[in-house]
Image (spheres, rainbow, N blue to C red):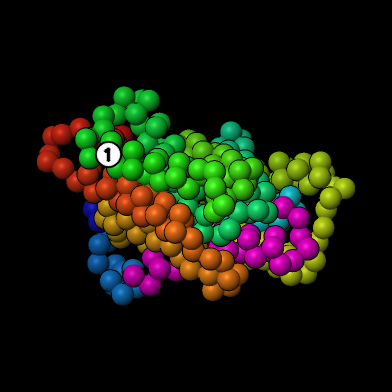
Amino acid sequence: MKNNEQVSFYYGGKHSEPTNQPDGSYACAKQNINYRGSHTFAQDSMSYKRIAVLTALAMIAFAGNSLLCRVALENTGIDAASFTTIRLISGAITLWLVVRFRGGNQNGRGNWMSSLALFAYAAGFSFAYMSLPTATGALLLFGAVQTTMIGYGFLVGERLLKWQIFGLMLASGGIVVLLLPGLSAPPLIGSILMLAAGIAWGVYSVRGKGAGDPFRVTAGNFLRTVPFALALSVLTFESTALDHAGVGYAVASGALASGIGYAIWYTVVPQLKATSASTVQLSVPVIAAVGGVVFLAEPITLRLALASVAILGGILLFIKAKVQKPGRPSIESTG
């Protein structure tokens, strides 16, 4: 990859671009990073096998957030507020250590508004998983992030191609189908909370555009969420519940699935084409669904399967539609 070449991706909340991207994401929820100066990456600096392995590990880590949260809230005694607080603190510590040992680019430290959006995502995510199945939660989150990113692009005047519009309508229709009343419909409150979490992550991603080095910005934003998280724990003190297993899952979610997951992703994404980085993230809800089936014996209903095809298919269509003839406008902007 040439110096100053921009790449786009979804999860991480840095240098986000309202494009085809989530998680965040979440193609429409892609992030754009301009690696300059000391942060350049040679295209051949990493073997294809290593790229594939690291990409797979990052996607598993992102999907792991959904599974770890659902397992903790379903099978242990920890409450959602405590899970959120421990996840954010452990993620902040891990990312701070990564930044300290990594060195390099000193640009970017995060900001309070982005941290508030990050906290809103994490809190909504945890409270939603008190009632939502793993696959449903991951799918709603992914769809909400993508839709938020696309909507932002549209509001700032970016033009959509006809196939992008069709893809957006298909994905939005999938979310509507998933939430329609019926025996197999997910709990309404949990669904609203997860959609709100997805919107918050989309806002966080938009705010990350051009914010600086993604490692430092992510670490700075995680550190700034700690006061919000502690305030949440104080407000919910009477319902606080902790056990060793629940704390362990929360630490794993923050330190491994979030902290190490982002570190791996930021390492590999410069080696990927923009469309590849976007497309591969479609695997996250699928991996989460498989984990829910394997570890929690959650059923895959016909409604969920059809909604998944519509949402993921619509987003994939949106991603691919931007690969167009030179000179035609697209919602993806690297500006």
Closer-to-camera residue (205/237)? 237
Q: Nearer the viewer, residue 114 or 200?
A: 200
**Up-down relation of residue 1 to residue 33 (above or below):** below
Residue 223 in the image: x percent, y percent? 64, 47
Q: Tell me, yes or no, if residue 248 can be seen here.
A: yes
Q: Is residue 274 left or right of residue 89?
A: left
Say which quadrant the C terminus sits in.
top left
Indicate left or right for 126 with 56 as reference.
Answer: right
Image quadrant where residue 19 sits: top left
Q: Measuring 57% from the left and 52% from the top, which residue is drawn there? A: 183
**Residue located at (29% from left, 72% from top):** 47
For disc 1, the marked residue is 166
Position of residue 81 relative to residue 71, above or below, is above
Quarter in which the N terminus is drawn: bottom left
Question: Left or right of 281: which side holds 242?
Answer: right
**Magenta-tinted stretch:** 52-80
The amino acid type found where label 1 is placed reads: Phe
Residue 245, position in %: x, y?
74, 70
Secondary element type, mark 1: helix
Q: Would you say residue 287 sits in the magenta stretch? A: no
Which secondary structure class fits the magenta region best? helix
Residue found at x 35% / y 59%: 280
Query: Is 192 left or right of 149, judged from the image as shown?
Result: right
x 54%, y 48%: residue: 182
Instruction: Verify whether residue 63 appears in magenta.
Output: yes
